[in-house]
Amino acid sequence: MFRIIISLFIGVVIVALNFTNDWAEARMTTNATYKSFSNAVVNAEIGLHVGLYGINVTLKGKPVVQFNETIDYNEMFSWHDSIEEEYEEALEKGLPNPILYIAEKFTLRSPCGLIYQYRYSGRYASATLWTAFCCWLLANILFCMPVILYAGYMMLATAAFIFFSMASFSTIMNVPQCVFSIGADSFETEYSHSFWLALATGVLCTIIGILVVMLNFLVPEKIKEAFSVGVDSYEDEDLSYGEGYLNTVFLDGVTISPST
């Protein structure tokens, strides 16, 4: 049961990591101009959450209600669609200035050029994560067959592709960092929960893979018993024969020829 739970945990995490929005994030609390063509200044917590498919920009007032308006925004901007169109829609909706400012940094016209690095890094990271998921599926199939060694190899391959996805996403930190300045404060993105969860899952897969490979060479029969494969269990049947007798009725007319 424990083995099944660990395996399901790894599979669920790999799939979930593709859709989370907190691979990297930044947040701060500051005073900022609320909307264009207005002198209203609000105190709010501003957050930027980066995923593999886009970004989430949050704005939450402190307190939430200011100027007779509830300030609690959570806007998604995706890489797959044209972020230019989403940015224009945000302008038409009249979203607060801090959200528009951050979203504008990821448009094609921005001198920061963040969209190119973040979009391609996210795509490659997602592709390698799905490859890791395929390796995980193969590993589970092989664990049910008398080829435990190859199941261990596939767990190591799963870990390798998880690490490849992390390396791909990490390239966003190699480009010149674009400073987000809002009001009198500024912030930069840092690795967040999903990144560290991917690291922990990759380490877990590595440990499992190494243990399986080592035990397969040291005690192959024991590990096959542990995974309930390759062991034939047959119950010995005790065949008991009762005392027999000859029925003379059926023997009548039977001639036994003497052996020569």
Image (tube, rainbow, N blue to C red):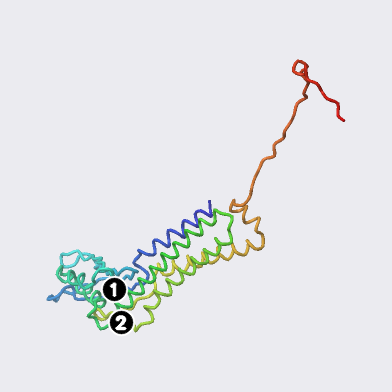
Q: Residue furthest front?
A: 260
Vertical position of residue 33 compared to residue 257: above or below: below
Mark 2 / mark 1, whichever is N-terminal: 1
Instruction: Characterize the local packing of mark 1: few (<14), some (14-19) or many (20 or more) Cα atoms within 10 angstroms.
Output: some
Dot 1: element:
strand
Amino acid type at image mark 2:
Cys
Determine the residue positioned at 15% across, 70% down.
94
147 relative position to 240: left or right: left
Q: Position of residue 20 (x, y in %)?
A: 35, 64
112 relative position to 18: left or right: left
Dot 2: element:
loop
Determine the residue positioned at 39% across, 78% down.
171
217 relative position to 136: left or right: right
Which quadrant of the view contains residue 217?
A: bottom right
Vertical position of residue 176 compared to residue 130: above or below: below
User: How many marks can you see?
Assistant: 2
Q: Which corner quadrant holds the C terminus?
A: top right
Q: Position of residue 187 (x, y in %)?
A: 31, 78
The residue nearer to you, when weighing 243 against 107, is: 243
Instruction: Characterize the local packing of mark 2: few (<14), some (14-19) or many (20 or more) Cα atoms within 10 angstroms.
Output: some
Which quadrant of the view contains residue 90?
A: bottom left
Return the residue at label 1: 29
Amino acid type at image mark 1:
Thr
Please report contact status of discs 2 and 1: CB closer than 8 Å, yes or no.
no
Alpha-carbon span between mark 2 and mark 1:
19 Å
88 relative position to 133: left or right: left
Vertical position of residue 101 compared to residue 75: above or below: below
Return the residue at label 2: 178
Determine the residue positioned at 45% across, 65% down.
132
